[in-house]
Image (cartoon, rainbow, N blue to C red):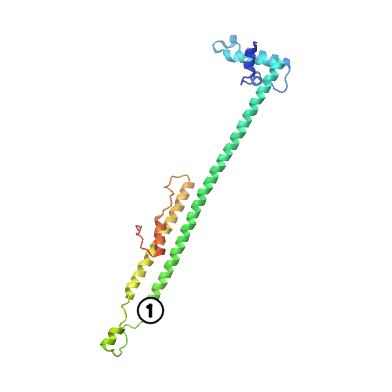
Amino acid sequence: MPSDDLTKWITSEIDFYALLGLTPESFTADELRRAYRKTALQYHPDKLGAAFDADKYEQFQAANDVLADPESKQKYDNFRNGRMQRQRAAALFEGKRRAMKEDLEARERGGSLGKRSREDEEMDENIKKLAEEGRKRRVKRESMMSENVSSPSSPMSAPRPPPQAQSQSQPRPQPSTSATSNSEDEKVARLERLIAEATAAKAKRKADKKARKAGKSSESSTPDTSFKADSNAAFNGVHAVPCATP
């Protein structure tokens, strides 16, 4: 075989050992000859006829020439071992890269779950604050109603002061107890509505989370800020635009 062709086959990607059915670490010259003859009969043009594969026939002939020469075999083995090491290194790198990718995705999923947990905790805290505020306002309302009931319906008759003294000692007009009570009723009702809306929003989040785990399509998980705005307005005493009551 010409030296140029020999160099081409020495650096070939073809596994000559697998092609001839030989064990790379240990085979004798007799085993090589028997393997070559067996393969030659298998791929011979007289046997295959129209199905003859000239490229395959050339490959096992080159395999016999390279492996039969000790110097060529050593060069081929060195090149083959280097190629196999590169393949193993590439496979190892790919395995590590895949593991890092999966770990990163797991961390991202964990981060999003942690964010949803914090949002759930914040919603629970807002519900507790609204409930406490509603309790305080109900107590205040009941106290005002008790004072209104216990106070006399009309003051006892007393000597009328002179007109001038009466005009000087006349107290400033105070807001009626009825108007104050109505205002407290409205605040309590608004707090109770906000608590109901917050509870419904929390139940919806749990349903969406359950649907995501089951692999079902759900609506966007963007947190609803309308409840937070209403609750903050309630804490600050500002009348928020009421949401539609279901």
Figure quadrant of residue 133: bottom left
Residue 137: percent from left, percent from top: 41, 70
Label 1: how many Cα within 10 Å (few below 14, some 14–19, many 20+): few
Is 67 on the left-hand or right-hand side of 148? Answer: right
Query: Where does the image place residue 185, in percent across and percent down from the top left?
Result: 36, 69
* Quadrant assignment for the N terminus: top right
Q: Could you tell me which quadrant the C terminus lies in?
A: bottom left
Indicate the amino acid at tag 1. Answer: Glu
Residue 172 lies, with reference to residue 156, above or below; the image says: above
Residue 69 vs 84, above or below: the answer is: above
Q: In x, y percent, where is residue 46?
A: 59, 9
Q: Nearer the viewer, residue 239 or 146?
A: 239
For mark 1, what is the residue? 147
x 47%, y 59%: residue = 124
Q: Secondary structure at mark 1?
A: helix
Residue in view at x 50 percent, y 51 percent: 115
Most extreme residue toward the top, as rendered?
Answer: 46
Q: Is residue 143 above or below residue 242?
A: below
Q: Quadrant of residue 30?
A: top right
Residue toward you, 228 or 16: 228
Location of residue 38 with respect to 152 vertically, above or below: above
Name the residue at 45% across, 50% down: 208
Q: Residue 138 location in percent, x, y?
A: 40, 70
Q: Say which quarter of the image contains residue 147.
A: bottom left
Q: In the figure, is residue 31 to the left or right of 172?
A: right
Q: Residue furthest bottom?
A: 159
- State how many labels appear: 1
